């Protein structure tokens, strides 16, 4: 049973614990006091600290968890849940019962980001490749977070969400999703409302082999282990300090990824000049790179990046709301029109059943006149609304043309029958004569 044991008499250095909690909670998308408290408790207990120490550290690092951790009963319940979660698996926090899923996703992320890309095969430019790698890393990292949060096997990604993550236009993020889908790097597995759910595509054998050459990085990424250069860089891709620092940008993240791999300029989707420019940006914006965590460096480099991203998200969300409202209006009009056309088609079928089929052009004039007059009277008794009568006239004109009547004649007869213009059976018959 978990309890708040007293802190041992010797001093406990919690600076490392605080750092780990800041990293974990900074990456987490948990947005309620209870969820954030549980995330922090799991991480602290996994590091071997006493429950009381962890509870205090979480409150210190994340004051917003106070509603969940200050009441004794709530804190005990959350600690018990965190302890039970860890007891199910010896792995790092968040892995739990989903270790295999996390390993599979991490392997696909590392494989795609490490293996060379045949741009000619995909029809990609260097710019396409860099955007695709960045977008894939963001989606993959978000999927790892979803597995940690609720065991989800797919991630909800919209072009708006990806545009916020990449600080680009919705058109650009939509193109990135299209590139990844067509290349098989991601696959569509369903929708929620108007948003699509995605999974990472399977790796070709040769890419999978490349991934296992970096097995330590795969495991570090899957288990949340700090200290592996490649895994740490990949894990940082969603930090707003990359996309929203004017001095960096996500291409700088990609440059650091290649540094972690020990790659050369020729292996990257950059020109030689840009390769050097991006390196200088990393040195300038992130002094102390390699001696401090990326989270700390990125936050110090641009403390307001997270706020800027929030503003950008609100802006694009508002735009999307307006766009979706307009789209809903267009769809409503389209659906209403389709419903009226179905109604008109049903009316035309009933007319045919009761009066008879549309006569052929070579039918005797008297028979055409009789059919037109009887049909006109039938429609008049039905009293269709004006828009329905117009659609009925359209359908009848199509049928008349299909039976050999000239276009003008077919239009006159159809309009008379549907009652959408002043005409007479004689006029309709005259039209039939001209058609003959």
Image: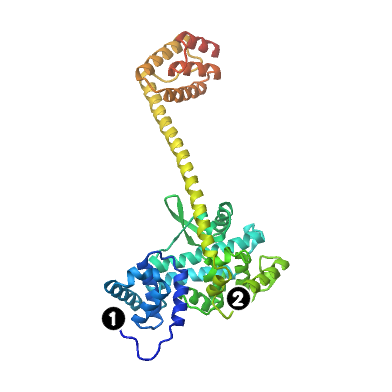
| Residue farthest right in this picture | 273
In depth, the one of 253 and 23 nearer the eye is 23
Query: Which quadrant holds residue 384?
Result: top left
Counting residues from the N terminus, which is met first, the one under dot 1 or under dot 2?
A: 1
Query: Which quadrant holds residue 210?
Result: bottom right
In depth, the one of 357 and 57 nearer the eye is 57
Check the picture and name the quadrant holding the C terminus: top right
Tag of residue 3: 1
Name the residue rendered at 56%, 71% in the picture. 298
Q: Determine contact: label 1, label 2, CB under 8 Å.
A: no
Name the residue rendered at 42%, 67% in the picture. 147
* Residue under label 2: 260
Tell me where residue 321 appears, x and y as whole percent.
Answer: 47, 48
Tag of residue 252: none
| Residue farthest bottom in this picture | 10
Tell me where residue 349 appears, x and y as whole percent.
Answer: 39, 25
């Amino acid at each position: 049973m978990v309890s708040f044991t007293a802190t041992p008499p010797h001093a406990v250095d919690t600076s490392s614990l605080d750092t780990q909690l800041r990293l974990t909670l900074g990456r987490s998308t948990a947005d309620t006091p209870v969820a954030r408290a549980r995330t922090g408790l799991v991480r602290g207990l996994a590091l071997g600290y006493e429950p009381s120490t962890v509870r205090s550290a979480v409150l210190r690092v994340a004051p917003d968890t106070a509603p969940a951790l200050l009441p004794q009963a709530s804190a005990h319940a959350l600690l018990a849940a965190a302890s039970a979660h860890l007891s199910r698996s010896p792995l790092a926090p968040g892995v739990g019962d989903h270790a295999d899923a996390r390993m599979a996703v991490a392997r696909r992320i590392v494989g795609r980001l490490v293996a060379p890309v045949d741009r000619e095969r995909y029809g990609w430019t260097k710019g396409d490749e860099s955007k695709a790698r960045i977008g894939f890393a963001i989606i993959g990292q978000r999927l790892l977070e979803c597995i940690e949060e609720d065991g989800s096997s797919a991630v909800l990604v919209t072009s708006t969400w990806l545009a916020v993550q990449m600080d680009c236009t919705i058109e650009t993020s939509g193109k990135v999703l299209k590139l990844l889908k067509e290349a098989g790097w991601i696959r569509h597995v369903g929708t929620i409302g108007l948003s699509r759910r995605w999974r990472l595509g399977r790796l070709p054998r040769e890419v999978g082999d490349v991934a296992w050459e970096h097995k330590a990085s795969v495991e570090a990424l899957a288990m949340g282990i700090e200290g592996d250069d490649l895994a740490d860089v990949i894990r940082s891709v969603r930090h707003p300090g990359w996309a929203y620092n004017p001095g960096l940008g996500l291409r700088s993240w990609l440059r650091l990824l290649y540094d972690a791999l020990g790659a050369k300029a020729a292996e990257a989707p950059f020109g030689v000049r840009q390769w050097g420019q991006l390196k200088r940006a990393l040195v300038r914006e992130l002094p102390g790179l390699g001696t401090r965590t990326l989270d700390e460096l990125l936050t110090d480099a641009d403390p307001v990046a997270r706020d800027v991203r929030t503003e950008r998200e609100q802006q694009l969300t508002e735009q999307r709301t307006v766009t979706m409202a307009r789209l809903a209006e267009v769809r409503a009009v389209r659906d209403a029109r389709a419903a009226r056309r179905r109604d008109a088609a049903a009316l035309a079928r009933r007319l045919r059943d009761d009066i008879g089929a549309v006569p052929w052009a070579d039918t005797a004039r008297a028979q055409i006149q009789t059919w037109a007059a009887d049909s006109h009277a039938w429609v008049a008794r039905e009293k269709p609304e004006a828009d329905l009568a117009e659609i009925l006239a359209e359908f009848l004109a199509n049928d008349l043309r299909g039976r050999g009547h000239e276009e003008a004649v077919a239009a006159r007869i159809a309009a008379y029958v549907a009652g959408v213009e002043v005409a007479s059976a004689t006029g309709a018959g005259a039209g039939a004569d001209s058609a003959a």
